[in-house]
Each structure stands twice: as C-alpha cells, then as structure tokens.
Amino acid sequence: MCGIIGCMKKNKSNVAPTLLYGAKKLEYRGYDSVGIATYSDKIHVKKDEGKIEEVHKRLNLYDMPGSYGIAHVRWASVGRATKENAHPHTDENEKVAIVHNGTIKNYATLKKELKSEGHTFTSQTDTEVIVHLIEKFMDDGLDLEHALRESTKLLKGSYAIVAISSDEPYKMVATRKDSSLVLGVEQDSYYVASDILAMLKYTRNIIELEEGEIVVITDEDYVIHDKFDNPINKEITVTPWTPEMIDKNGYPYYMIKEINEQPEVIQKTLNDKNKIRAVLDDIGDFERICLIACGTSYHAALSGKYIIETVAKIPTNVILASEFSHTLNVLDEKTLVISVSQSGETADTLKALKMIDEKIKTLSIVNVETSQMPKVTDYSIITQAGPEIGVAATKTYLAQVCVMYLMAGILGNDSELIERLYEVPRYIEEILERCDELKVYSKRYSFVNDLFYMGKGFSYPTVLEAALKMKEISYIHAEAYASGELKHGPLALIDFTMPVISVIPPGEDHDLAVNALEEVKARKTLILTIGSENDDIIEDKANDCFLINPEVDEEIAPLVYIVALQLVAYYITVEKRLNPDMPRNLAKTVATE
Ligand code: F6R
C-alpha cells in the first residue's frame, strides 16, 4: 500500500525533481511519510513523516545530488508513521538502500536471525530485513542483482523492491511478487515504479514485470532476467493513458474533476459494448455468477447483482473478498466468478481469486490494465475510467456499474436496457449543471455528526455507496439501510440529531420507499430526498429535495442518482475544510490483507 519509484537519468541530469514528481503521483497509495535516496559518491537519504509537501518544506527534497535514485510514499502497515520507519531503508554502513511496497510476513523470524548475526535495526518495519539480507549476500561476494535474488528466496509475503548500492554505482535493480512493478523506457532515462502514473509525464513506453523477474538498470541499458536468471527480451507497450489525464485541469481537487468526468466515462464504457460481448462469448455457458470485491467495488457488484438477476435472470451471489473463503465449497464449474476492482491490486480480492479451483472460470473487471488482477483471471474487462487519483472512488465505481449493466443487457438479450444506457451521460450532465443546488444543501448538513441513508431495491447499493463516500471523506458517521429494514431496528436511531438522506426514484419500489420516509418524518428529523421531478409525494415529505429527470426510473437510477450523492459528500467535505483527495488513514491501493 505504498508507492515506489526508481529513476536512472542516462544523460546524468539531476534525478531528485523527477523522483519527487513521481512520488507525488503515487501519493494516492499512501501519504504517511516520504523519502528519497540518490547516489553521488555515496548514498544520500532524506526522509520524514508527513505528506510530500510538508516534508519537502522541511527538508528541501530537490536538494539531493545524483542522476539516479529511488523514492517512496508510505501507508504505514508494519510500524507507525515515523521518520525511522519511512523508506528508503539502508544498512548500517549505507551501502545498500531500498524502497519496498508489500508486506513481508516472516519478517520477525528473519529479523531475529539477522540480529543474532550482528545486524543492527533502526526501524520497526518489515522492510528493513530486506536491506540487511541484500547487504549480507553482497558481503558474501554476490553482486547487487544476485544478492536481491537470494534475499527474495527467503521472503514470504508480497513485495515490489527497488535497490541501489554504493558498491555498484550507476546500477539499480528491481523485482516483484504479488505487488505490481512497471518499467518505463525512454531514450535518456529509465523508470521503475508501482504504477505508470509515476512516470506518465516522462514516458508512455512500458514493460510489465512478471513475478520473479529482475530488471537490472544501468546508465547504459537495462536487462530483464527471468526467474531462472536467464536474460529475456520483453516487448515494450504504449499505454493508452496520457499525461493530460492526470492533470487537475483547473479543478481544486481530483475528486470533483473525476465526478465531472463521469458522462464521458459512461460513453467510453458503452463504446466497449462489443468487446464486452466478445468476452462473454468466449467465456461460454455458466449458470451462476459469484461476484467478489471490497468497499466501493463491492457496492458496484451489488448493483450488478440487482440488474443481472432482474434482466438476465442468472442467480448472482456477491461476496466481500475478505469473507470469501466460506463460499469456496459452493462453487462449481457452472459458476462464473467475477472479481471487481478499481486498482486490480487489492490483496483481499487477489487472495480470494487464488483460492479458486482452476476448473472454475474467472473474469476480472478492472480499471488498471497493468495491475495483477487481469493476470490471475482467465478473462478480463478493462473499465474505461482512465486514471483515478482521488482516494475515494467515483468514476471507477460508475464504470464498473455500467459494465455490469451492459453484461446484464447482453446476457439477458435486453436491447431496450442497453439503448437506455446511451441516455445516461445526458442525465448525469443535467445533475452536474445543477451542482450549486447540492452545494446549498450540503452547507446545511455539514455540521451533523451522523447521517442515515435509505434506499430500496436498485437504490439500496446506491445508498450503501453514498454512505461509504460520506464517511471516508467527511468523517461523518453514516449508516445506510434498505428502506424496508428501518422498522426492524434502525428506526430507534432516528431523532432530530440524525438527518436522513433518502433515495426514491420512480418505479415499483417507490411507494414502499415513501412509507419508510413517512416513518422517519414522524420522528421530526431533517430529510434530504433525491427523487424524480414531478414527484409531488416526496416533495411534500422532505425538507430538502433534489429532483432528477423523470425519465430516470429505478432500474437505471444506480447510474445516475449516485452522482448527486457523490457531490453531497464532496461539498460537505470541502465545507468542513477537509481534503477529499486524501482522507486520513486510507490509501487507494489496499495491498494488505
Ligand atoms: C472507497 C474505495 C475503497 C475501494 C476498496 C477496493 O472509495 O475506493 O472502498 O473500493 O478498497 O479497492 P479496489 O476497487 O481497488 O479493489
């Protein structure tokens, strides 16, 4: 859950600004601490606790000599967020410096052994064992790449590692297992990083490193060795992502930029209809679907269940990836397992996929093509959301839901549903144009401590997602319930201190959802309803209403109503003077179980 980058400038220009820029682009993976190591006559290290901008102000991270080096942004997992635990880590003599993303499960045993051999540890991290192992193997006479290879043979867990050594100047080595690592190749420089966002400004030419491969980068060239240590040739591919895609384009935060990109994301997803059809044709017959995902992707999967069961009539089960092991017994060869993930790196979801018998077909719906998930599933569909930087998922969620609507339409031969999806970008535009109305409502709800969301049927996953968005960026406690469940317990929570946000699109569930609204209205609390224009019934029952185009009925509402709810969460967060792009304690890629 950290971000790592290494860069070698063949033209010998100063590397620190490039490393810092790359680290900044990886900050969505963690922002507890940051550090840089460069080489010029010796290894130079600067690191500290805090976000890049704060640390840069204190230490001037540009002021680092050398034309190659490594950098790291950390999401603390093993060891608190302190300067000592920040990467890069070095051995006692600063002969070796490394950055690491992943978790070494057997680090405690290795640490004990290394300590007994006289190594001195200065941090509480799992990573520090790697640097001492490399040092030890180099002291035994191995070069840097073979010392790295021997070290990884002793590691249990996940890692992407970049290492440099003052004993072998102008060389940088990197490898990975269960954490991603991408090599970038340009005329005048080489890059290696957790993902392409770190290098996109400089190159779009990339090579994905496979498990066990080691790349040796020098100031002249790079060589990739396979897991048997044989040099191999790997094709360079050009990523479809462009540097413009990761600009804020004048928006104050990535989150609001990404919310505004959603009409285009839906359009691009719909353009992929034939590709999705081809994947489903390849997969062939199946009788059941099991969707696995975490967090926001889990809510997208739940929306998928509603539409797939309604339209394609295929029994669909949705399981939290971290709870998946209990479902293994009921999977058979007639089940299609679908993992849904924005990052494609979520450890819980990858672990679940690894448990599945090879005979069972697996499909991943993933936004990051170079991530691990497409590599470990039989089939994959790449969502067309483009890079998402804000930690709170917005446009990737909508892209996932849209893919599942297309799948439902294709599997259920429902061309009418598919036709209706083409109107969705217009409905979203209409909401975005009226965002000022939501801003006004948001001011009113920004100082509450608790919020209660309710929605019925197709809108139930929507309110679950809306409540998650609210809690993760505004830190307001938010609960979401299916409207029909209110009377079975949570109604006891409702009084004037617990405002309610209800989602009531037109359709079969409308009247029962209104009944639930009556129940909360009777408890004299503040109510904001997201509903349909011309719905006099709800206008009468809510204090505040945001009304959406009446053509949007309950079936397609999950692709539209969520946008208003994302905006409410965003505006409340900004109103509270919080940064929606960097919520506390969270990171975008959750590569830890
Ligand atoms: C919330 C959010 C998380 C992720 C979850 C799974 O806004 O983004 O809840 O959805 O960590 O991540 P992915 O989709 O990368 O598997």
Image (spheres, rainbow, N blue to C red):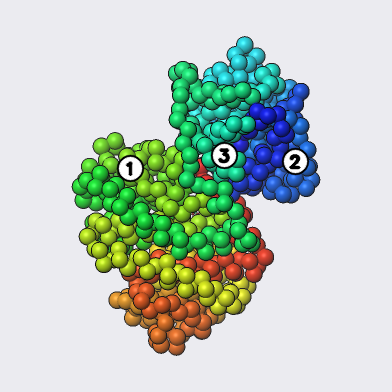
Image coords of residue 445 (percent x, y): 58, 75
| Marker disc for residue 61 | 2
For marks 1 and 3 on the same chain, the one whose residue lies earlier in the sequence: 3
Residue with the mark numbered 1: 379
Q: Closer to the observer: label 1 or label 3?
A: 3
Q: How many C-alpha atoms fall within 10 Å of the one at disc 2: few (<14), some, or many (≥20)?
A: many
Check disc 3 and give the amino acid type.
Answer: Thr
Q: How many C-alpha atoms fall within 10 Å of the one at disc 3: few (<14), some, or many (≥20)?
A: many
Residue placed farthest to the front in the image? 187
Check disc 1 and give the amino acid type.
Answer: Tyr
Q: Is residue 408 visible to the viewer in this orientation of the structure? A: yes
446 sits to left or right of 457:
right
Choose top left, top right, bottom left or bottom right for residue 218. Answer: top right
The residue nearer to you, when weighing 50 against 398, is 398
Q: Are marks 1 and 2 in contact (CB under 8 Å)?
A: no
Image coords of residue 91 (percent x, y): 69, 25
Residue at 54 percent across and 70 percent down: it is: 568
Whether the residue carrying mark 3 lies under 8 Å from ligand 1 is answered with no
Image coords of residue 361 (percent x, y): 28, 42
Check disc 2 and give the amino acid type.
Answer: Leu
- Helix, strand or loop at mark 3: loop
Image coords of residue 116 (percent x, y): 64, 19
